[in-house]
Image (cartoon, helix red, strand yellow):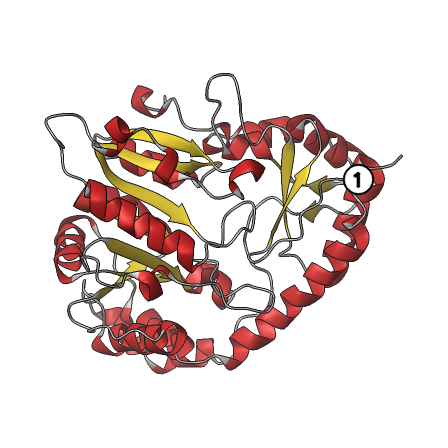
Amino acid sequence: MKFPERFSNLPAYAFPRLRALLDHHDPGGDVVHMTIGEPKHAFPAWVTDVIAEHAAGFNNYPPNEGLPELRQSFCDWLGRRYGVSMDADANVMPLNGTREGLYNAGMALCPEVKNGQQPIVLMPNPFYQVYMLAAISAGAEPMLVPATAETGHLPDYAAVDPEILNRTVACYMCSPANPQGAVAGKDYWRDLIALAEKYDFQVFADECYSEIYRDVPPVGVLECIGDADPERVVAFHSLSKRSNLPGLRSGFIVGGPATIREAKQLRTYAGAPLPSPLQHAAAAVWADEEHVIENRAQYHEKYDMADRILGNVPGYMSPEAGFFLWLPVGDGEAAALKLWTETGVRVLPGAYLAREIDGFNPGHEFIRAALVAPRAETERGLTAIRDVLYAT
C-alpha cells in the first residue's frame, strides 16, 4: 500500500528505512538495541495482581472518559508533582498512550482557518514524528523550528516571524526533549505561554519523560500558567517511561475544561479507551512513587556510566533528563551502519528524527542512543560506540 502523498514530507524514520539499512548486514553475535525508547527495566510486580483482581471488567465496554478512580489518580499525582489543583471531571482524560493524545490534539483542537489563512502548527526540529502527522491530518501546515546547540536544544519560538505566529494555532514542545535531553525551565515556559497569549495559540506540552531525570525534577508547564488563559496549555503524561509500562498504554491529557470537552467529543467517535482492568492497574501505578524512585536510580547509574565511558568525547552532552544520548558523529547514518556491522549495536541516525530545511538537517551529524537496556548490555553498547566511532 502506498503511503499517502500528503505524508511524504515526514522524516525518514516514519518509514522502514532503518530496518532496510540494517537488515542487509548481519554482524552475528548478540545484538544491543539502543534505537527505540522502549524501557526494559522491570515494572511493579503487583501490576498483574491488580489486573487479575479486576479481570471481570474485560466483559464490559470501558468508559470513554475513564474510570473515576483513574481520573482522580491523575489529579492526585499532578497535585503531588506540580502543586496544581485539577478537577477529575473537567480537566483530565485518559489516553491509550500519549501518542494517541498528541495526534488527536491536532484533530480535536486545531481550527480549519486562522485569520483567513491555513493554520500553522509549530514544532521543534528534531521532533517526534507524530507532531507533524497530527498537523497534516488536521489540515494545518507544519512549521519546523530548529532546536540545536545554538538554541540550547530547545526551539526558539519567539524568533519566528510574526506573520507565521499570526497563523499559528498550536506549538508542540517536548521537555525533557527527545532526542537531546534538554529541559525547559520556568522562564522558558513562561515566555512561551506569554507568546501563545499574544498570538492566540495553544501550547501542546509533551512531558512523557518528566520522571526520568538526574537530581532536580523538570519544571512542568502547569506550574507556569500564572494568569494566562487556562485553555492556553495542554499537557500530556504517560506511564511508559515513568513506570516501565509501555505496553499498558496508559497516558492522560490535562487542560482547560473546553479543551477536555473537545478531546472527549473526538474520543466518543474515534477513541480506543483502555480496558477497565488496565485502568484499575494504571490508577494504582500513578498512585505509587516508590517504584519510580527505584527506576530513576537505575537511570542514574546509566548516566554515570555514559559520562565515564564517553565523557572525553569532543561534543559529548551529558543529558539533563530522559534516557537518550545525542552524540555528534559527523554522519549519523554512516556511523549507525558502521556500528551495526562491526559490533551488533543498533542506534538511530539523527537525521531520521529531523527534516532538512534549506539544505540543513539538524540531526545529520548525530546518532541517538537509548539507555533502556539492562546495565551490562548498555555498558557494552556505550563501549562499542566509543571504541568504534571515537577511536583516535
The x and y percentages for residue 187 are 41, 56
Check the image and name the residue furthest to the right. 392
The x and y percentages for residue 143 are 34, 30
Left or right: 358, with 138 as reference point: right
Left or right: 344, with 72 as reference point: right
Residue denoted by label 1: 343
Which residue is at the front of the view, 359 or 387? Answer: 359
Check the image and name the residue furthest to the top. 359
Q: Quadrant of the C terminus?
A: top right
Q: Residues within 10 Å of mark 1 (few under 14, many from 20)?
A: many
The x and y percentages for residue 166 are 21, 32
Which residue is at the front of the view, 40 or 167? Answer: 167
Q: Quadrant of residue 172?
A: top left
Q: Quadrant of residue 138?
A: top left
Residue at 30% of width from left, 59% of height from top?
A: 95
Residue 278 higher or lower than 371, as above or below = below
Which residue is at the front of the view, 44 or 222? Answer: 222
The x and y percentages for residue 315 are 71, 40
Q: Amino acid at mark 1?
A: Thr
Can see residue 377? no
Assign a secondary structure to mark 1. helix
Residue 279 higher or lower than 116, as above or below = below
